[in-house]
Image (cartoon, helix red, strand yellow):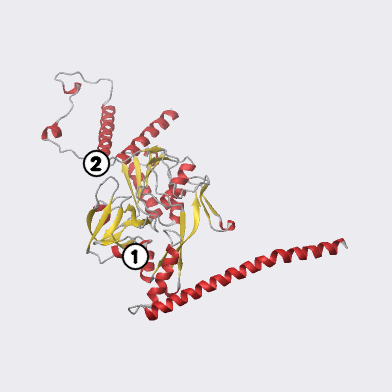
Amino acid sequence: MAAVGGTLAGAILTTQVAGPLVAQDAQRNSSVYQQLDLFGDVFERIRSQYVEEVDPAKLIESAIDGMLSSLDPHSSYLPPKDAADMRVQTRGSFGGLGIEVSQEDGFVKVISPMDGTPAAAAGIQAGDFITHVDGESLLGLTLDEAVDLMRGPVGSEIIITVVREGVEEPFDVSIIRDTIKLTAATVRAVGNTVVIRITTFNDQTYPNVSDGFETVVADLGGIDKVAGVVLDLRNNPGGLLNQAILVSDAFLESGEIVSTRGRNPEDTERVNAEPGDITGGKPLVVLINGGSASASEIVAGALKDHHRGIIVGTKSFGKGSVQTVMPLRGDGAMRLTTARYYTPSGRSIQALGVSPDIVVEQPVRAPQPETEADSTRRTRSEADLRGSLNNDSLTEDEIRMIEEERAAAEEAAKLRDEDFQLSYAVDLIKGLATMAADDTK
């Protein structure tokens, strides 16, 4: 009797709970179908009664784009041509101005100009707002519509109106469109410091970093001759997640690099580093600024949380979401935000960014005219005095080494005028390497 009673009570309880839930689902589905009927009704009225004949396909595309763009600034519909352009862009070559943009308060905001592009040459800066293109206001347009206005034939001129913080009035900038061919990463030596500059994360990023690092280290005489590494991620708008993981892994021996969490808890994915640090544990400084976004922030966040490198510069952009590009029928695609990513400490950088360990602003260059007297003036020393004594405590080789070190220091000082943040990072590497050398004695 107890068993039967329990079964009967369970059946009654299940019926009482499940009944309202089923009714709610049915009501929700009915509401969705009613809204779809409403959409069909509006579509037919526009197609048949609008003052001019319209293209039904464009109406549908606009409706899809409106649906996606209402979600967040990074979800959008890609018509067949844009989808093809995007696929080319991830391979490292595309046409345009060379700027990564987002939308804020209805205007187009520059995340970062890309190195060696027309936008960078014209002086466009991260944080600039673009309000007009060839005199046409961008207010009220979707991000894709605004980007379409900025596209055009290679060699054609475009005039964009820019609003910049600290500048009282909007100003116009003329740019000649060009084919953008990006070298994803370059590697060079500044003294005995290896500087890795990553401009974007596409299919070529990690190969560029790996091959370039090997070449520069060989030129310096081996890894033992390397004082440390500067990883320059400034004005890097991001790109492919897998490339950000590979670059992070290059400097980590173990531990989590990044985790992504989707709508459902079971969609959580974690990526861990494989053993092997290409630098052999050399000091590492990572440069970031307000133009460092998305994949750049994954790298900076991973290296910071593992205390693998010192983060120098200014706060990064703060894009902590992952977009998946999904092919659609008709060769189009949709870019949909499908997950948030988290640094190894479990922190999201969405809207917060990665904060540097050492804040270093890039000063505005104010070049002073050099006079002939300034260019020829030199500080006099004891060695310039007639009849001064020679230094008998050093060998010729030791004297030559001191002179070479002095020349390297003077060369580094020149870098401060060209790029203060990079100069700071190189000086920091030199200090860390000196301390490490003292500890081994």
Percent across and percent down for residue 270 are 54, 52
- In the rendered structure, the answer to whether residue 14 lies left or right of residue 143 reads right
Outermost residue to the right: 1
Q: What's the mark number on residue 137? A: none
Residue nearest the observer in this picture, 6 or 227: 6
Quadrant for the C terminus in the image:
top left
Residue nearest the observer in this picture, 106 or 259: 106
The 10 Å Cα crowd at callout 2, few under 14, some 14 to 19, many 20 or more, is few
Percent across and percent down for residue 50 are 36, 78
Relative to 24, say whether 105 is above or below.
above
Quadrant for the N terminus in the image:
bottom right
Q: Which residue is drawn at 70% across and 63% down?
A: 17
Outermost residue to the left: 372
- In the rendered structure, the answer to whether residue 324 lies left or right of residue 182 reads right
> Mark 2 = which residue?
365
Q: Is mark 2 on a helix, strand or loop?
A: loop
Q: What element carries label 1?
A: helix
The 10 Å Cα crowd at callout 1, few under 14, some 14 to 19, many 20 or more, is few
Outermost residue to the bottom: 48
Lower position in the chain sequence, tag 1 or tag 2: 1
- In the rendered structure, the answer to whether residue 60 lies left or right of residue 29 reads left
Q: Which residue is drawn at 38% across and 51% down?
A: 209
Task: Give, as a three-letter code, the residue at label 1.
Answer: Glu
Q: In which quarter of the image is residue 373?
A: top left
> Mark 1 = which residue?
145
Task: Give, as a three-letter code, the residue at label 2.
Answer: Arg
